[in-house]
Amino acid sequence: MDAGPGTDLGGVAWFLGIWVTMMAAMMLPSVSPMVLAYARVGRARPTSAPTAVFVAGYFAAWTLYGLVAYGLYRLVDAADLGLLAWHRAGPYVAGGAIVAAGLYQLTPIKDVCLRHCRTPVHFLAHGWRNGAAGALRMGFTHGLYCVGCCWGLMLVLFTLGVMSLFWMAVIAGVIFAEKMLPYGERLTRVVAVAFIVLGLWIAIAPDTVPGLTDPSTDMGPSMQMES
């Protein structure tokens, strides 16, 4: 479970099962307006595919993101450069990754992707495609926009402990607020500052960060960052 930064991701099959389940729990609340809008529009179009096909395309995009993240983790781990060792460069790598995620919150790409996620009707009106292949493509396209909007937030989750229920709840709350609340677009700036501060805090004094599991604690043979 939660071993803090550097939590062992296990085998790829196990990771994908946990990852897709986690994405369903974290993302469905914020993607529900798009799914419901697709269902409503689809009922008026006899050539449309079931909503489940659209959702499958959406999660295919997030599955791809998970595989890329898993591959990068394995490459860094296999290189054995000490970058993940908590008693060496670990806090600086973790803090730097979170600072980078905070800076991404301020980019135009983040704004474009978030705007897409907040306006489902516009996407359906201009990007509708009939049939199962069309629904799958629409779901995948929307998923890519969602990845573009939230990949930095998920990087923070990977960094702090991908199995941490506390950080899952925090990141899911941030995603929901940005996509669903009336002033969600403005919140990206607040979140950016919060992540930058958190990243610097972890790099300087990780032992004092509330909710952060210390990877140097002996939690069993699955630990990847040992003191």
Image: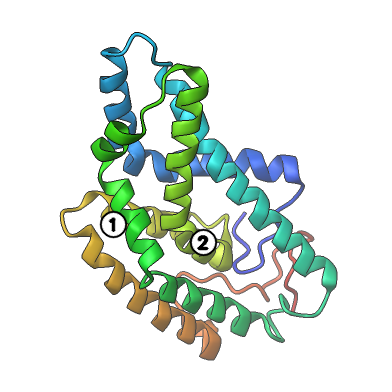
Which is nearer the eye, 208 or 141?
141
Question: Which numbered dot is residue 103?
Answer: none
Q: Name the residue beneath numbered marker 1.
A: 178
Picture quarter with the C terminus: bottom right
Q: Quadrant of residue 139?
A: top left
Question: Which numbered dot is residue 157?
Answer: 2
What residue type is disc 2 on? Leu
Q: Residue at x 65, y 72 (%)?
A: 215
Q: Residue at x 60, y 85 (%)?
A: 92
Which secondary structure, mark 2? helix
Q: Is residue 6 rendered to the left or right of residue 136?
A: right
Looking at the picture, how far across and down is residue 96, in whole percent?
Answer: 55, 81
Classed neighbour count for the residue bearing mark 1: other residues with Cα under 10 Å, few (<14), some (14–19), many (≥20): many
Q: Is residue 45 visible?
A: yes
Looking at the picture, how far across and down is residue 135, in whole percent?
Answer: 45, 25
Q: Is residue 25 visible?
A: no
